[in-house]
Amino acid sequence: MLVSLWDAGLGQAGIVCHHNLENGDAELLRAMGLRPKARVRVCKRGEPLIVEVLSGCGHGGRGAEDGCSCRIGLAGSLARKVMIEATS
Amino acid sequence: MGAGSGGSPRRVALLGNPNTGKTTLFNRLCGLRHKTSNFPGTTQEARIGAIRSDEGGDRVHLIDLPGIYSLELAQSESAVCREVLAGNLAPRGEPIGAPAAVCVVVDSANLARNLLLVGEVLGRRLPTVVALNMIDLARRSGIRIEPAELERQLGCSVVECSARSGEGLDRLASALATARVPNRTPPGTREGLEEWADSVYGLCVGHPHDAAAPPQERGPAAAPRRAATTWSTTDRLDRVFTHPFMGMLVFVAVMTGLLMVVFQLATYPMDWIEAVFSGNQEWVAAWQPAWIAELVGGGLTGLVEHLMPPGILRELVAGGVVSGIGATVIFVPQIALMFFLISLLEDTGYLARAAFLMDRLLRPFGLPGHSFVPLLSSHACALPGIMATRTIPDRRQRLLTILIAPFMTCSARLPVYVLVTVLLFRDRPLMAALAFVGCYALGAAAGLASALVLGRTVLRGAHRPMILELPTYKVPSLRTAMVTTFDRSVVFLKNAGTNILAISIVLWWLGSYPKVDPPDAAVQLRQMAAEIRQTRLADSNVHDSRTAQPAEPSATAPVGDRDRAADELEERADQLESSHAKASSFAGRIGKAVQPVFAPLGFDWQLTVGVVTSFAAREVFVSTMAVIVTGQDDAESQGVLEQVGDARREDGTPVFTTATCWSLLVYYVLAMQCLPTLAVTAREAGGVRWAFLQLAWMSVVAYVAALIVHQVLIASGVA
């Protein structure tokens, strides 16, 4: 099921499919690890939200249980443009 | 920092993602053996430190580059790093040229993302060392990195280390001295680089659960996936710290504690500094003999006056140089404490959560959540507030915050508020308190409104939505906090401090020159005092010759009265001379000349001189008014304040009418009137033009607001 990060529920995990962001934001988020195939989890909903990017993109990823992740505070306007494939 | 014994030191660029412990590593490797500079043509700060080798001599010089996520981003930090690696840019004072090596600091617990930057650097074909920092935390989290395999995959040296514990730092220092060009080159495209990073990560990182899996199933895919409903400690802490209500409570508590510590604790060293420069009469009793007590009582100013012969040079040194240095150094305790605590908070990971929380409140005004701490700090003093804007990553938003910070009511405004609210609401403390609160609110509202206006005009730019990394919670490093504090204090003294000193000397001169003859009234008073003393002396001689005995105590009473009368006349003459000297000084003359400009605000020449002379420091207004009106500078005396309040214009009308008081109050809430702040703005914003813009904007806002208030009140019949 394809949903935006904004619409994903609290604790929802998924894999980033694509984002429809402007160049500067897209490049920054990509460099921060929030890129296609990245495993993510929504830690806090609302404006702004917190999304956890799990390491090991493209390989299923390491979980936050390993401390192998980073958290990004994201404005709602951006979160609406990041689409994820829900995995749990 | 000198050159190494074997020739020029090897320059190594220190690069890494934000929150990888790069600064802690730099501090650990270099300690205080570093200097702070900047990159020419930019506002980016550069720190250059020396790693001392066992043989002695500085063999490796580290250049601490800004934390970046990628070399390819359009941000100024990335541009600086690109140029430094390309050899086109070097810190001021350093020779231009590519660094001898690059040390990429990575967070071992977040290796996958960090490998992207590593790949970009490897593509530059410079000798490279990868520092696997925070390896202890990664191990504790169950992450097992194979350094030998990683070294093979990257084609460069990889050193496991921990800047906090010191583990592996010797090995890292050795590796930096012998770094080699990598023998592998990652793909050049973004997609290719990401795939390469994932592949390297999969090959080099193992987990405890991998041991039970067959080799073909090891790797990231085998990692257990946590149920979505399982929450970590970080989740739970984040839930509290970023909650709209609970988070705000924690934030208020933390900020209150921070400001209380900064501004309460700082008063002690500030008092000591003031006493050292200006003297402290309370200390006099503790010193013997009397001449030492006199020196102690007068501080460095008194010492200069004691040691140097009277003249212009002595006045310059005592009134300009020593006072100017004192006016600079006195800010150091606040700045040092502020940065010490902010560094600790930042290191814990809390500051990012605070910025996250406040973002919602400040975003409508074009400010990021990061602005809140600097703006709050500015309520005590704008100087540490402006310097605290360094935590704001976006330059445009940082400039905006710097420009509006002085609108926040600082402690220097309080003497003016006290004077005016006492005049407006004598015997009505509740109303006076409400007026005080109103002043704070007006300053904050004007600041936020200014952010809106400036953000849509002078600093117009794309609205940058929040993208903020929330780092892992950690125990803060005291060492890093102390080195940061030292660094910031030195930067303040070297840069802003020299400006403040120069400005202080100029203002001292404007307020002290030209020297003028005493006014006729003062001369007459002195003549009268001299006559009284002469008469008393003559009477005393007659009395002594008649009795040929020492005068009894009772016989001296009328003589004592006459002495007191003469003393009072001389004191009054002193006051008239001080008042006359102040009004006749260049600053006073400028005040009189520009009085027509301030007339629509209801200011007469006395008030205008007060405004002009307090241009450097608004707290000077009350003492200037006290000197002009009463000839005394004891602005804390109730009697003097009342005299100031009762001051009359030359036509006999009161100086402080209700309308004038409100107008003056509004003017001082909004006006800049603080040259040290302008000096720090110029330094932190990266140009004098920003200081001029700040001065012009605040002056216009203050003038127009005070004008409106005065004219409306006059039109309403409030005189």
Image: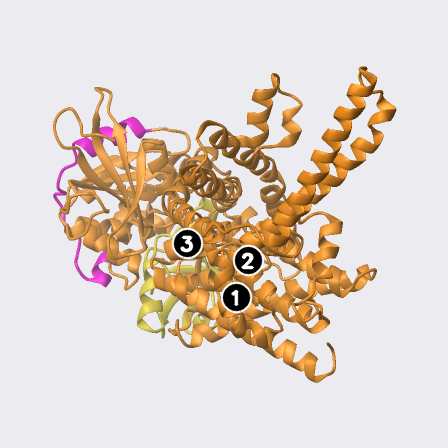
Q: Is residue B460 left or right of residue B170?
A: right
Tell me the yellow chain: A
**Do tag 2 and tag 3 residues touch (Cβ < 8 Å)?**
no
Q: Which residue is mark 2?
A: B583
Tell me where residue B355 appears, x and y as whole percent: 52, 57
Q: Are marks 3 and 1 in contact (CB under 8 Å)?
A: no
Q: What chain is the orange one?
A: B
- The answer to whether residue A13 of the structure is visible from this angle is no
Is tag 3's residue or tag 1's residue first in the polypeptide sequence? 1
Residue B177 on the magenta span = yes
Q: Residue at x 35, y 42 (%)?
A: B22
Q: Which residue is mark 3?
A: B679
- Residue at (28% x, 26% y) in the render: B170
From the image, tell me which residue sits under label 1.
Answer: B592
Callout in the foreground (2, 3): 2
Assess whether residue B397 is covered by the magenta stretch: no
Residue drawn at 53 percent across, 32 percent down: B302
Q: Position of residue B396 (x, y in %)?
A: 39, 65
Is residue B409 shown above or below B205? below
Q: Tell me the subunit letter for badge 2.
A: B
Amino acid at circle 3: Ala
In depth, the one of B69 and B482 nearer the eye is B482
Segment tinted magenta in the rendering: B168-195
Say whether residue B625 is left or right of residue B35.
right
Q: Is residue B482 above or below residue B609?
A: above
The answer for how far apart the CA atoms under marks 2 and 1 are is 8 Å
Say whether residue B229 is left or right of residue B455: right
**Helix, strand, or loop for circle 1?**
helix
